[in-house]
Image (cartoon, coloured by chain):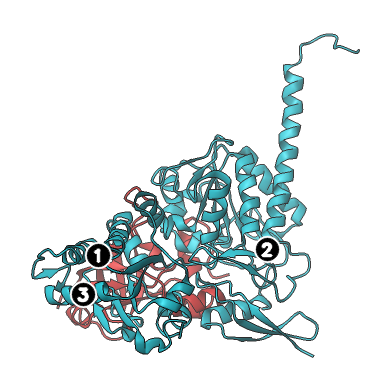
Chain colours: A red, B cyan
Amino acid sequence: MANRITLNMITQRSIEEGVAMEKGKTTPEYFEACSIIEMHDDDVKALGLVPNQLVRVTSECGNVVVKTVKGRQSLYPGLAFIPQGVWANQVVPPRTQATGEPQYSGFPVTVEPVNGEKRKSALELVQGAVGMWRGDQ
Amino acid sequence: MPKKVENVGCPYCGVCCDDLVVTVSDDGKQILEVENACAIGNQIFHHATGSERIRLPRLRQPDGTYKDISYEEAVDYAAKVLYNAKKPLIYGFGSTNCEGMAAAAKVAEKAGAVLDNCASICHGSSFLAIFDNGYPSCTLGETKNRADVIVYWGANPAHAHPRHMSRYSIFPRGFFTGKGHMSRKIIVIDPRHTDTAQVADIYLQVKQGHDYELFDAFRAVVRGHEIPDVVAGIKREQIVEVANILKKARFGTIFYGMGLCHSDGRNHNVDIAISLTRDLNDYTKWTIMAMRGHYNITGPGAVWSWQYGYPYCLDLTKKDIAHMNPGETSSIDLAMRDEVDAFINIGTDAGAHFPIDAVKHLRKHPWITIDPNINMASEISDLHIPVGIVGVEVPGIVYRMDNVPIQYRKVIDPPEGVISDEELFERIYRRLSELEADEAVKEHAKAAPEGVRAGE
């Protein structure tokens, strides 16, 4: 069992994210729709994860804690998916290959289980990144 | 008696469903029911009359909280931010009408700003490929009425364009496609076995980031060349089988999405998709279409191309000379190089959808959000200006993903006092003109020689 593995990350829209986004990005629905990661069963087993266990995802430009879920849409081993949104964008590299478009799909991340940590809310992540987070208001 | 409004356009995705039926309460203030919309479109209409709507502009205070201010004060603040900035960036336009986009462009030109839209992080690569290689496309109606082979490549309409398959591609019965789904072949190519792949006749699980190679293999087979045993994770036999289906189609459409534009290669992936489409036209009729995300994100490309000759990443810092060069004048690149000193986020949420590093860079400078709703951008802004929701409270022209313009209507009034994007930008433009005129008077006074003036 590995302590951490390296996967290829992609991030795209999910309908759950779409519905929750229109309801509001501070809602519990948005939190549950987007603060998750989907992986292939082989990779979940390699990390010894149990369903709903939290993991830290780290890329070249940041890290984020998300929940492991078994998605309806399957991936092949080595590929990981976080729905587009606040959590994914904590790790998306801003490099654009001179096109203006960030590397939303196809960048390396390491995934490792975490203990004693919680997922942060969307507001805490975004306001925290720019020094405006004032705690749970 | 509740009123039913028919043929309402949906302000969510690029499919622009215009068959919604919205039931409005007797007093015209509540939306009671929305028929025909997908789950996301439904949510937009019902959210409009929710209690959480913002009714006045909010200005950030020194203690970090927001204070309500008048629209007049907000317009003055926004105009002064733009006036004082050397190179402001006005970005977004995912959720507004063409009238608002044209008004914003006037402001950008007056302020010497960079004007960019969500295509910059979405289908911008498609523009680059289309400039290089053309766009053998069609309307969604032609696909519905003629297509017997549909390819979804790097696109997942089941999640991102929920009614695309039922209105235009897979299921509808068209003029020459009377059997609907039964007479069509559906091919889905994606690294994930998506919900869209569930309805495919053939699914190819391409290795992520290797789309270009697979397109290349299809082109080679179509032209009668040999290919390796496996390309991009797909066996030769499958590639040959699909290539033959493509060649034998009566009419085909390739719908492609972010799987091509967001992966390594970007515009080159789209470029070769267009080349494959062109190759197939040696045998039969093939078309290609970008799965544009928002309901009117095709709009700024149409409006600004007409106004300035470029669809996005417009540098108007020289005011009357437009310049476009993605990589240099694109929002993310400008942000990462710290080249802009003010940011207006309009009809989008850069706070949630930009990589967080770009958000950090942009937040070093004044940040104004123009949006009907609270979102991540509004919660890190200096100023949040609420506006009416286009398609629900504000009418206007939108461009569907196939470049067909549609007149959207409103079904209810916006909350009392809340204005449209177009009116807001017109008011900012007038205030900018006043500031410019004031400065011209001061400059004139400074330039005038000391002593007696003519007429005195």
Residue B435 falls in image quadrant: top right
On the rendered structure, is B265 left or right of B406?
left
Residue drawn where x is 56% and y is 36% of the image:
B86
| Mark number, residue B244 | 3
| Relative depth, front residue between A91 and B93 | B93
Residue drawn where x is 47% and y is 61% of the image:
A128
Q: Residue furthest right?
A: B456
How much space separates mark 1 and mark 2, taking CA atoms? 41 Å
**Image coordinates for residue B68, horizontal then vertical, percent:** 72, 60
Q: Mark 1 or mark 2, which is nearer to you?
A: 1
Q: Residues within 10 Å of mark 2 (few under 14, many from 20)?
A: many
| Mark number, residue B211 | 1
Q: Residues within 10 Å of mark 1 (few under 14, many from 20)?
A: many
Residue drawn where x is 48% and y is 55% of the image:
A130
For badge 1, the amino acid type reads Asp
Reading the image, the residue beneath label 2 is B387
Residue A69 shows up from this direction: no
How much space separates mark 3 and mark 2, taking CA atoms? 52 Å
